[in-house]
Amino acid sequence: MGIVIRNLSFSYEEAPVLLNINLTVHTGESVGIVGVSGGGKSTLLKLVSGLYDVTDGEILLGARESTTSRDSAARRKLVAMVMQNANLFPASIRDNITCGHDISEADIAHACEAAMLTEWINTLPQGLDTFVGERNGKVSGGQAQRIAIARAMAKNAPVILLDEPTSALDNDTGDAVISALARLARNKTVLHVSHKPETLACCNRILRLEGGQL
């Protein structure tokens, strides 16, 4: 499933952030977008993901056209997003992976293995039922990020959106998360944004977002 963005513009109140964005990401392609912090990269992903409504322009995911607010829910079903700071619920590891959906134990185990969580989870007395704490307080940054990756794995969405998922991690932890992300992105359509071009080396193409334009 590919992504087609046509004539997309977006403003926060009166401040323009994105100006006439046009982009095609082909099925199975990985495209990186680099730009300064606050330059609109995260806003673009939130529009593609359905977290924000499209009001000026259009976004196509596969054959499903998403041009107005009523299509945001449809876009959310088709994408999985991993952000800079993993947003975990104050619940168990299992609940953070399934998000209340009926996912088999085999699929949960596969997601944990792919996200490089299995070895750590096996050391926990409560395993998958371990509580992550308020605001991820009982897990490290790398563990929280890999739980978020396992969540995206379990969703098995055709489109993966990555919003600087390693920028808040140290190098050793970042390497482990990068390996997990590579497994997540395999055979998927990927849009990956970062302010560090070196983190986008695995992308098929790298574009620059500057002044609200690609």
Image: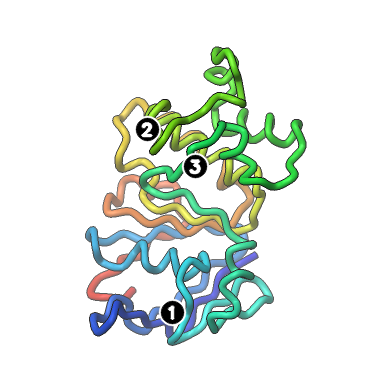
Residue 20 at what x, y percent from top left? 37, 84
Image marks 1 and 2: residues in contact by CB distance under 8 Å: no
Camera-nearest residue between 35 and 98: 98
Image marks 3 and 1: residues in contact by CB distance under 8 Å: no
Residue 99 at what x, y percent from top left? 61, 46
Q: What element carries label 3?
A: loop
Task: Tell me the CA gap for discs 1 and 2.
Answer: 34 Å
Residue found at x 49% / y 42%: 89
Residue found at x 60% / y 69%: 73
Q: What element carries label 2?
A: helix
Residue annotated with mark 1: 22
Mark 1: amino acid: Asn
Residue 3 at what x, y percent from top left? 56, 70
Dot in front, 1 or 2: 2
Residue annotated with mark 2: 141
Q: Quadrant of residue 127?
A: top right
Q: Which of marks 2 and 3 is nearer the N terminus?
A: 3
* Quadrant of the snapshot with the C terminus: bottom left
Image marks 2 and 3: residues in contact by CB distance under 8 Å: no
Mark 3: amino acid: Phe
Q: In this view, does 127 lie above or below 28?
A: above
Residue found at x 44% / y 34%: 144
| Left or right, residue 86 beside residue 92 | left
Dot in front, 3 or 1: 3
Task: Tell me the CA gap for discs 3 and 1.
Answer: 35 Å
Q: Earlier in the sequence, mark 1 or mark 2?
A: 1
Neighbour tally class for label 2: few under 14, some 14-19, many 20 plus, Cα within 10 Å: some
Dot in front, 2 or 3: 3
Mark 2: amino acid: Gly
Residue annotated with mark 3: 89
Camera-nearest residue between 32 and 113: 113
Q: Earlier in the sequence, mark 3 or mark 1?
A: 1
